[in-house]
Amino acid sequence: MSLQSVASSAAIATDHTCAVQPEHTAHSLSHYFPDYFRAVQANTEPLRRATYQLRHQVYCEELQFEPERADALEHDSYDQRAIHIAVKHILSSALAGTVRIVTSQFKNELLPIEQYFAGNFTNTVLAPANFSRQHICEISRLAVPAAIRCRTLSQQQAPSLERACSKLVAVALYLIAQILCLRAGREHTYVMIEPALARALRRVGLHFIQIGEPIEFNGIRAPYYLDARTTNATLSPEYLQLRVLLEKQLFDKNNSNRPQMTLCYSAPEQPAAC
């Protein structure tokens, strides 16, 4: 399966109203992706608010997984201890996608996957409880708007190469998440996704291991584990190239917007921890 086909599968895994479009003829879109899109960490209040707005647009308005809110912001208690990530469309500065990394410092700070699958992991060896709380995290709330999921980004104006590169936004978000997981020392990574998306990501080279049976949660979802330290060895060459370019966008010493990886917060009835 080609780079573009895998990206298409990932992009539409949660939205079956979007039809797969013909592949672009470019040998590799990874090289051109940074010309149109930029990886950023949403570590300011305006950027975090923008991610909540995008999540509301996707989860509440487009997919109707969550009820619409008066303030048009979709957020929850996990956001207070999450690293927020976005991909920005360079020309318009609009967000093309977002995802978050939920972290944990203390035993009372469960990951979402621990709450939904409590006591029901079929692979208990890889369950979060077997690892230090400081080394686990969960990637969740992937949100890519319909214009990107269905590849209708400015169809009349955007160059065809830009539209083709937009297919990579969903996968790019997972790659950025893996980069930041490793930078934060959170190598034991969890997701709760559709089995079809897990298969698509495996073809990319993100070898998520299923650790529980699927449940109904905004569609069929199953829990998966990934050791983030393995990704450099398992990613296909084109996606490894994209990962390198995304990491350069995030951490280039000349990039004034590079992420600040310090994460410090207080849990209820616990001392502050950094």
Image: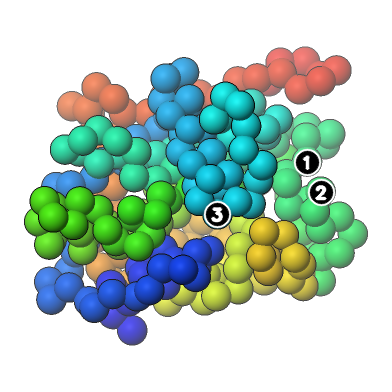
- Residue 256's x, y, as percent? 24, 22
How far from the left and from the top, in percent, is residue 108? 84, 34
Which quadrant of the view contains residue 226?
Answer: bottom right
Instruction: Name the residue at 74% across, 71% down.
Output: 214
Q: Say which residue label 1 marks.
A: 110
Check disc 3: other Cα within 10 Å, few if <14, some if 14-19, many if 20+: some
Amino acid carrying label 1: it is Leu
Look at label 3 and name its amino acid. Answer: Leu
Q: Nearer the viewer, residue 199 or 12?
A: 12
In the figure, 2 relative to 114: above or below?
below
Give the foreground label among 1 and 3: 3
Circle 1 residues within 10 Å: few <14, some 14–19, many ≥20: some
Q: Judge whether 38 appears above or below 127 on screen.
A: above
Q: Residue at x 47, y 26 (%)?
A: 48
Are discs 1 and 3 less than 8 Å apart at CB?
A: no
Circle 1 SS class: loop
Q: Disc 2 and disc 3: Cα gap in Å? A: 23 Å
Residue name at image x 54 percent, y 70 percent: 198
Which residue carries the number 2 mark?
A: 115
Q: CA distance from mark 1 to mark 3?
A: 26 Å
Of residues 183 and 94, the one nearer the viewer is 94
Determine the secondary structure under disc 3: loop
Quadrant for the C terminus, please: top right
Distance from disc 1 to disc 2, alpha carbons, whole Å, reads 7 Å
- What is the x, y in percent for residue 69? 62, 32
Query: In what element is the residue under mark 2?
Result: helix
Relative to 100, 107 lies left or right: right
**Residue 98 visible in the snapshot:** yes
Q: Which mark is residue 196?
A: none
Q: Nearer the viewer, residue 203 or 35?
A: 35
> Which residue bears the numbered disc 3?
63
